[in-house]
Image: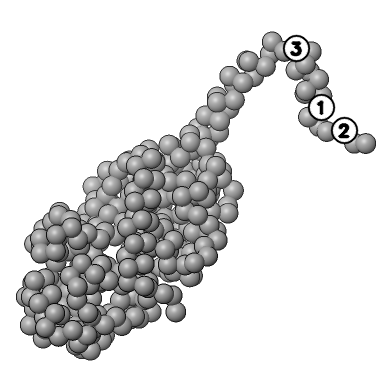
Amino acid sequence: MRSSPSLPLLTFLRRRPWLLPALLLLLPLADGASAQAWPARTVRIVVPFTAGGTTDIIARLVSARLSEALGQQFIVDNRAGVGGVLGMDIVAKAAPDGYTVVLGSTSSTAVNVGLYPRMPYDPLKDLAPIMQVATGPYVLAVHPALPAKDVGQLIALARARPGQLNFGSSGNGTALHLTAELLKSMTGTRMVHVPYKGASAAMPDLLSGQTQFMFSDMPLFAPYVKAGKLRALAVTTAKRSSVLPELPPIAETVAGYEATSWYGFMAPAGTSREIINRFNAEVVKVLRLQDIRDRYRELGIEPVEGTPEQFGAYIASEIRRWGAVIKSADVKID
């Protein structure tokens, strides 16, 4: 029978048992040394959506600066599909060596858990949080022909015309759809959802008045609001946003309303804590650069710093929040 390669080592230790404590003490040092050597080659940042969206832009901003600072390439790999499930699953099943990470978001990380009856991974068990890197509000905008100058008037109009107001979204079960469903459930209104294949695809009907309102990130709305083709009413964060201070939060009219757009890095479960801490520390340095903060402001988002534990707890709370909305609205994937 072929002997195990570990047997000589076991025999050696049996004959010299006093060496075992010293070897055990060296294990953390070896792990720390591997973290110090990281990154020794190209790091892949998976974006579970197509290029051009906010997730993709953030990943490219951060990856470029990490490449400069650490002397290794950080490349963005767009793996869109199944509402972000495909890209997240690739990372959940990748080697936990610090060379494959994912930039998750509200929809790909939290919403999908309640939306898909069978997920190929568990974001709380199969992915290790590194840090949240951005947060921001969604913006509620209406067609200017709609006689609603603020959120209160929109709600009153919806109550006066049940089932007659239409709202577009980036797709059934997306964060933009559920943000509107949350408003419906908290105000007891009936409004009709019209799903599209992406927020950009929903814009023509909103601009023509075929749909009356929509939630989205501000960069998509900004040129039309400036031109008077849309009217921005409010933001979805609990308090006024520092990047859009002129817009009141919906919560000023609907107490307790809150929905945020957020983004954060995660690695495969089992990735060493030393590498996760190093990645966290290097990203914090990037987020403190003034040009990065300026670009964030243009995107309508704010940088976030925090520990892996804080991000993990936040992910868990968001899964619970959106799972309740999905169940209440009985949202089903087509």
Please report the residue visible at 30 percent of the width from the left and 43 percent of the height from the top.
305
Disc 1 residue type? Leu
Q: Which mark is residue 68?
A: none
Please report the residue visible at 39 percent of the width from the left and 45 percent of the height from the top.
312
Disc 3 residue type? Arg
Give the answer, above or below, for where 287 lies relative to 186: above
Q: Position of residue 132 (x, y in %)?
A: 34, 48
Figure quadrant of the C terminus: bottom left
Mark 3 or mark 1, earlier in chain: 1
> How crowded is the residue under tag 2: few (<14 C-alpha within 10 Å), some, or many (20+)?
few
Q: Position of residue 10 (x, y in %)?
A: 78, 23
3D distance between C-alphas at marks 1 and 2: 7 Å
Figure quadrant of the N terminus: top right
46 vs 145, nearest the viewer: 145
> How crowded is the residue under tag 1: few (<14 C-alpha within 10 Å), some, or many (20+)?
few
Mark 3 or mark 2, earlier in chain: 2
Q: Tag 3, which secondary structure?
A: loop
| Residue at image mark 3 | 16
Give the answer, above or below, for where 280 lies relative to 138: above
3D distance between C-alphas at marks 3 and 2: 21 Å
| Residue at image mark 1 | 7
| Residue at image mark 2 | 3
Q: Position of residue 99 (x, y in %)?
A: 53, 47
Do labels 1 and 2 touch, CB within 8 Å? Answer: yes
Whether residue 207 is visible to the viewer of this picture, yes or no, is no
3D distance between C-alphas at marks 3 and 1: 14 Å
Disc 2 residue type? Ser
Please report the residue visible at 34 percent of the width from the left and 62 percent of the height from the top.
324
Whether residue 191 is visible to the viewer of this picture, yes or no, is yes
The extreme right residue here reads: 1
> How crowded is the residue under tag 3: few (<14 C-alpha within 10 Å), some, or many (20+)?
few
